[in-house]
Amino acid sequence: MRNNNRKNNTSSLDELYEAILCLETKEECEAFFADLCTILELQTLSQRLQVAKMLRDHHVYHDIVGTTGASTATISRVNRSLGNGYDIVFDRLQKNAPEKHKNSGAEQNEE
């Protein structure tokens, strides 16, 4: 029975990942995650992302606590999991950052 629950859980997770991958805009993400998560859950996810970003930028725990309000236990947990997933996201965000600035500059020139 336990094995069956794990298989169902994997299937449910796969469905969640596929649902996230089909979102195309920030607005779609906001709408989906607002439906999916509570405000507290979203704040927790956001906080962990900020902690990971600060750890990647070599900030010390004391600064991270002060900036994010995260506990040292949360910071340690995020620190242990830094790697593939976070690296993919941060690398892509950095790669896409110049495009955002280019677009906002073009929009400003049109005004």
Image (tube, rainbow, N blue to C red):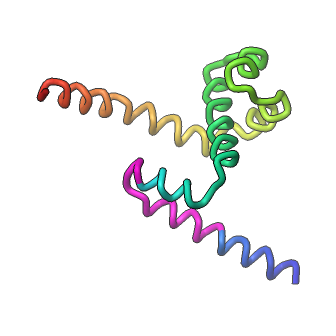
Seen from this angle, which residue lies furthest right? 1
Q: Nearer the viewer, residue 83 or 90?
A: 90
Q: Is residue 111 above or below residue 19?
A: above
- Quarter of the image for the N terminus: give it: bottom right
User: As drawn, is 38 to the left or to the right of 79?
Assistant: left
The C terminus is located in which quarter? top left
Horizontally, residue 69 falls left or right of residue 49, namely right
Q: Which residues are magenta?
A: 13-27
Dominant secondary-structure state across the stretch colored magenta: helix
Task: Report x, y in % for residue 18.
Answer: 52, 66
Return the x and y of residue 65 as percentages of the image width and height: 76, 22
Count of residue discs: 0
Horizontal side of residue 94 vs 79, given as left or right? left
Residue drawn at x 78%, y 15% is: 62
The single residue placed furthest to the left in the displayed view is 110
Q: Image quarter for residue 6?
A: bottom right
x, y percent for residue 95 = 40, 34
- Residue drawn where x is 80% and y is 82% of the image: 4
**Residue at x-position 74% and y-position 36%:** 78
Determine which quarter of the picture holds residue 46: top right
Residue 87 lies in magenta, yes or no?
A: no
Above or below: residue 73 compared with residue 13: above
**Residue at point 69% right, 41% down?**
44
The image position of residue 69, as x and y in percent, is 74, 26
Question: Image quadrant of residue 67?
Answer: top right
